[in-house]
Image (tube, rainbow, N blue to C red):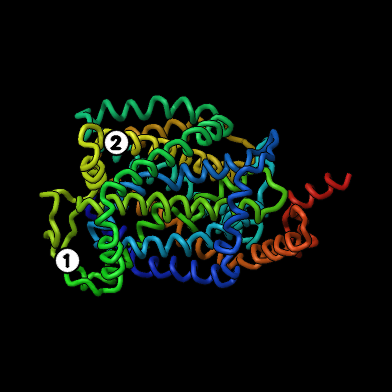
Amino acid sequence: MEKIINDIVGYIWSDALVYLALAVGIYFTVATRGVQFRYLREMIRLLFDKSHSKQGITSFQAFCMALSGRIGVGNIAGVATAIFSGGPGSVFWMIVMGLLGSASAFIESTLAQIYKEDLGGQYRGGSPYYIAKGLKWKRFAVLASVITGVSYGVLVPGVQVNTITDSFQTAFGLSAGVTTALVVLPLAFIVFGGIKRIARFADIVVPFMTVAYLVMMAVVLLVNLPNIPAMFALIVKSAFGMDAVFGGMVGTAVSWGVRRAVFSNVAGAGEATFSSAAAEVSHPAKQGLVQSFSVYVDTVMVCTATAVMILSTGMYNVAAADGSFLVENLPGVRAGTAFTQAAVSTVFPDFGAGFVALAVFLFAFTCLIAYYYIAETALAYLDQKMRYPLIRPLLKIIFLGVCAFGGIKSAGMMWALGDIGFGSMCYFNFIAIVLLGKPAFKALKDYDRQKKQGLDPVFDPERAGIENAAFWSEYCRRKQD
């Protein structure tokens, strides 16, 4: 079974998906005139917009919910895997993909806002909604909804729990069963509490854990300051095949850098579109900008922090093409959280491994909460009239059961299942947002125009020339009344 799963991963995560992700990021960066760069200050300002309602959540809460999905084990274990499999050069391509992917994140989150709906007193939206309304391909939307629900409800959650159990085993010697219980019980309390409880938890925990992790990285860097110039030189040389040891790994470095960036920040994969649609904003582009900034935080800041800690301390191994070790600084270790734990322990030997284990717990736990919300929102699209009231409780039970299963199964199988889920979504969503680029470009043009006039942009779909945005047409009517 594991071999079959790994074969499927090989087909899905072929070079086709790697270069598709890069091409889409470049296309949207050029088409939006570098929206992720020219509106950087605006992104930060919009984070603290306090607009909310009974139906929606604040931009900051939506940002934290999306970030809780972006910042997960990919930022710790995933970065280590990229270095192990692709060498130090993979870090360069991971950062490049993050910068380009933030434009893709802007497009998909803007689309999520344009085509969102008010269902049962809550804002709902995401990739199935804008596929149905924007492209008017209802069968494609149903398929996207099913793939999203299966991916986030079944395939992906096991990665997070498995990494928690692995890190707790290393740091505290806890068994997989005990650690799994420590994850699943509080997770059940939150997912049974609904979107408001999820949002409140995310906007408290996510900023705290991100800042704490970055502070730890800064301390490790200060201690290893003399090693920093050589480390960045190694990253750049390896990325372009100019390093004597890693010169033959350029293609592998690009592949693993892009793969781990997409797995970590999921820009363009559709994940953040569900929380983006839940935000209360006056213009869709506002939430697009907020989510574009979340990619900066995930990849350019947190993933880079992990990579810098690992490389500057020399606590890493690199695999050769035949499966042996090209570099073996940690005898026998093949990626996972062990690289990061060893790096932090060089400065904090007494609690370095424990700190990383707790960071993994918080990162992965908030990620699981985001996954559940995404799966439920995808399900809401399939059952908008709520004709089947038992479906949502059943989803909760299945989701928690999958988390328990993931905690005790092999790490290789869990990562492979996660790759299948993310990869499947990427293909569908990349195609959808490229085909739907025009409405997003119109929304950005409308936002640019109002900003130049010194206005706080308010979205009117008719004025922007966008059809089938029923929520916003009603929003404008209420404003006029």
Residue 424 shows in this picture: yes
> Residue 97 or 305: which is nearer the viewer?
305
Compared to residue 456, the image places residue 355 above or below, namely: above
| Corner quadrant of residue 137 | bottom right
Task: Quickly name the residue at label 2.
Answer: 357
Q: CA distance from mark 2 to mark 1?
A: 30 Å
- Residue 50 image offset from top left, x and y in percent: 67, 39
Q: SS class of the residue under badge 2? A: helix
- Amino acid found under the numbered disc labelled 2: Ala
Query: Mark 1: few, some, or many residues within 10 Å (few <14, many ≥20)?
Result: few
Q: Which quadrant of the figure contains the C terminus?
A: top right
- Residue 408 image offset from top left, x and y in percent: 25, 35
Can you tell which of label 2 and label 1 is closer to the viewer?
A: 2
Query: Mark 2: few, some, or many residues within 10 Å (few <14, many ≥20)?
Result: many
Residue at 87% x, 47% y is 480
Compared to residue 77, the image places residue 35 above or below, namely: below
Task: Quickly name the residue at label 1.
Answer: 321
Residue at 19% x, 59% y is 318
Residue at the extreme right: 481
- Amino acid found under the numbered disc labelled 1: Ala
Residue 410 shows in this picture: no
- Residue 422 image offset from top left, x and y in percent: 41, 53
Residue at the extreme front: 226
| Corner quadrant of residue 442 | bottom right
Direction from residue 145 to residue 55 in the image, left or right:
right
- Residue 321 image offset from top left, x and y in percent: 17, 66
Give whichever of discs 2 and 1 has the lower sequence position.
Answer: 1
Residue at 17% x, 60% y is 319
> Residue 50 or 22: which is nearer the viewer?
50
